[in-house]
Each structure stands twice: as C-alpha cells, then as structure tokens.
Image (cartoon, rainbow, N blue to C red):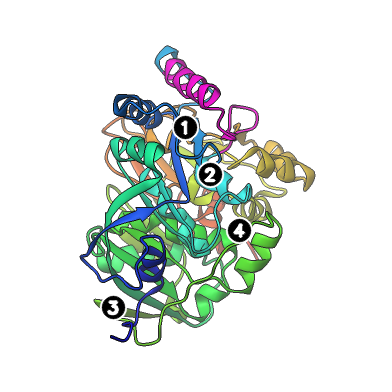
Amino acid sequence: MAKPPMTITEKILAAHSGKKWVSPGELIDVRIDLALANDITAPLAIQAFKEIGVKKVFNKNRVVLVPDHFTPAKDIPSAEQCKILREFAKAQRLTHYFEVGQCGIEHVLLPEKGLVLPGEVVIGADSHTCTYGGMGAFSTGVGSTDLGAAMATGRVWLKVPESIKFIYHGRLNPWVSGKDLILYTIGDIGVEGARYQAMEFCGEAIQTLPMSGRFTMANMAIEAGGKNGIIEPDETTLRFIKSKTERPYKIYRSDPDAHYTDVREYDLSKLHPLVALPHIPSNVKDVREIGKIEIDQVVIGSCTNGHLDDLRIAGRILKGRRVASSLRLIIIPGTQEVYRQALKEGLIEIFLLAGAAISTPTCGPCLGGHMGILAKGERALATTNRNFRGRMGHPESEVYLSGPAVAAVSAVKGWICHPEEVMKTKWLK
C-alpha cells in the first residue's frame, strides 16, 4: 500500500512513533525529544514522577526545568516551589536547569539555547509550549501528570490532530507584525476554531517574518484551541539554528496533496495593527477603530513578545520620547541574553530615559503573578497572549492585547493608538 500524503505535523509524529504514516484521530505512543516544566507545573510533575517509583529521568539532557513564572520568588510559597525544582534538578543532575540570573522566560530561552530544533517533538507542562512550532517542531502543552510520566519514560500518548492550513498573501502593511497576524486569525476563527487541531501557517507573508514573529504566531495557536501551531522551516529558520547550535536535525514538509479540514486564505493588503479587547483574545479590532481608550499600564514582554526584535521595535518608538505621566510602562526582556543585547544596543538606556521600569526576565504580570498587578478598574495594554477577566490582577480590571509597536506608542500617548500617531516613518523594519 502506498504511503498516503501527510502534513508536516503528521510526518513528525509518524517518525516519532515508529510508523510509516499516521492519520488524524489515531492514538499513538510518541517518543519525545524534550520535556519542559516551570515553577508552577514542575512540582506536580515531580510528585507524579516520584509516585511512579523510578529512580532516574529517562535522559538528564532532555528534561528542562525553568523557574520563570513567579521568579524571582515573590513570596514564601513561590520560593518553596522553586526549591522543589532546584533540589530535583540537583538530585537528577539535569543538564538544563536555569535559575535566576541564568534564566529567562522558558519559551524565549529554549530556542535561544538551541535546545529545540526542527522536526523534534517537545512537550511541556505549559500551554504555550506550542511556541516551538515556529521553527518546524511539533510542540504542545500537556498536564503535569503526563509530564511526570514522560520524564520517567521519554514517551507520551497523543491523538494525531487534524490540520488547518492558513495562507497569508501579500506584503505586511506598516507596523504589522506576527502578533497582528495571529490576532487576526484568532479573530476570524474564534477561540475554539482550531480545537485540538494543528494550525499550519504559510504563505509569502510568513516567509518575510523574523523568527520572533513566527514564534509569536505558534505561541498563540493555543488561544484558538489549537493542539499545535507550525511553520515549515526555510532559510530564515536555518540561519537562526546555525547561530545557536550544531546539533543535527531533520526538516519535514507537508505533501502538496496532504489533507486539511479547512484552508483559510488571507489578503493582508488591508490589515493594520490590531488590538484584542477584553475579555477574550478573539475580540479583535483595528486599532484605528476603537476610539480613545485611556490606559493605566503598558507591559512589553512575555513569551509572546519578549524577544530582542520586540524590544527593538519599542526602542525605535520610545527613543527621544517620554512615557505619559498618566501610566506606567513595564518592559521585560525575555532572557538574560536578550537583556544583555538590549543593553549593548542602547535600548535599555532609551527605555530608562523614557521613564520605563525594566524587569529581570519573568512571566510576572502576564498571569497576574507579580511585577505589574492591576487594581480594580485599571486598564492595561500588554504584548502578552491572554486577556481573560482577572488575568493580570483584579477581576474588575481590563487587559488589552497588541504587538510591541502599538504598546510602545500607546505608552507615549496615554491611550491605545496607532504608531503613526507619533512616527513619521511608516515601515516596521
């Protein structure tokens, strides 16, 4: 029997389950390349691991622990959580444990360290583990119990997802980034529009995106209910990998006649910077059409937009300008290396002179952890990925989502607005 055509997601899963091919809906036992957890999810995974009764993780080089959510520890319970990770990493002699000072937001850190490559299978006890699909890996979030079992066995049980293809045509308009593309997509299909499906992103517009924009799109696949987001590797991907590691990898590509449950095509000629209004990521509007919404806080960072490219965009807008006196601007580099490079390029000085507060790498305010909690009635504009009620603090606060360009210019003006409100140069480069 001839091998049926497959998508990139199906090919990766087939290769990691010892099969010539797999089909959507099939339950498979998958060999993983990497297991990831953070300071919120790892303690439960470690408990499950210990209950299994095994003495050692399946591979000390392939279990990664990153305390990034409530760190540096904001209180005693947070410190206790981190201590569990630290002691487990030491006992298991894990190669990849990233403590404060060496740390970063996990989904920015792992690609930077060359720990994820195209064609690999990565699972993490964090829903935004789907980020690594931006470089052509199959990556997805799992529960802590599943992760505990995977740390012991190096395997995970999965159902092969169906796939949706999203094709983005045309050239990106001024100040439009990967964040706008994924917000637009979620606005189109809704927060359940890709439930347990692979979201495959392609088209000429995707090929023009830097890796940061690709990671952003894959990162937010979960906000549409997706099992994973994925982009086929190209020359941009290969250049990124070459700068990070010399480990071998394999590239997979979808067959031209592979089956998709849906194919969505978008003409980007009329797409402008977007904002997701409270309290759901699909409540998306053109920033020019929302009126004058005054804000109390702006956050630039997170696993979605804490990359160096994001800080460069913010720096370009903030240079020579001041943050509005009516709000506070918090900037959070995604990793220590991003922070160091931003310092080297003069971005940190730009932010300081503008009146921003700059944090050590942390998820912090994104999940209402610390470093920017909202009070009752306050509004925040953030480059984060979720704007659910109470996500960043008080249940009667509001969170709006945007890319770094809209966030930076809004910090200057004091209300949510288009970058052209202050920028004469149109093109985002």
What is the CA distance from the residue labelled 2 to the residue labelled 1? 10 Å
Which sits earlier in the primary sequence, circle 2 or circle 1?
A: 2
- Write the residue at 71% across / 58% down: 243
Q: Nearer the viewer, residue 47 or 41?
A: 47
Magenta extent: 78-104
Mark 1 lies on residue: 364
Residue 151 is one of the magenta-drawn residues: no
Residue 56 position (above or below residue 165): above
Residue count near mark 2 (Cα–Cα under 10 Å), binned few <14, some 14–19, many ≥20: many
Mark 3 lies on residue: 260
Which quadrant, please, contains the N terminus?
A: bottom left
Q: At label 1, which amino acid type do we have?
A: Gly
Which sits earlier in the primary sequence, circle 3 or circle 2?
A: 3
Q: Quadrant of residue 93?
A: top right
Q: Nearer the viewer, residue 229 or 249?
A: 249
Q: Quadrant of residue 335?
A: top right
Mark 4 lies on residue: 422
Mark 2 lies on residue: 301
Q: Nearer the viewer, residue 188 or 363?
A: 363
Q: At label 4, which amino acid type do we have?
A: Val
Q: Residue 219: horizontal and vertical position, in percent?
A: 43, 54
Q: At label 3, which amino acid type do we have?
A: Tyr
Q: Nearer the viewer, residue 63 or 228?
A: 63
What is the CA distance from the residue labelled 1 to the residue labelled 4? 29 Å
Q: Residue 107: horizontal and vertical position, in percent?
A: 50, 46
Looking at the rendered image, the disc whose residue lies closer to the viewer, 3 or 4, is 3
Which sits earlier in the primary sequence, circle 1 or circle 3?
A: 3
Q: Are marks 3 and 2 in contact (CB under 8 Å)?
A: no
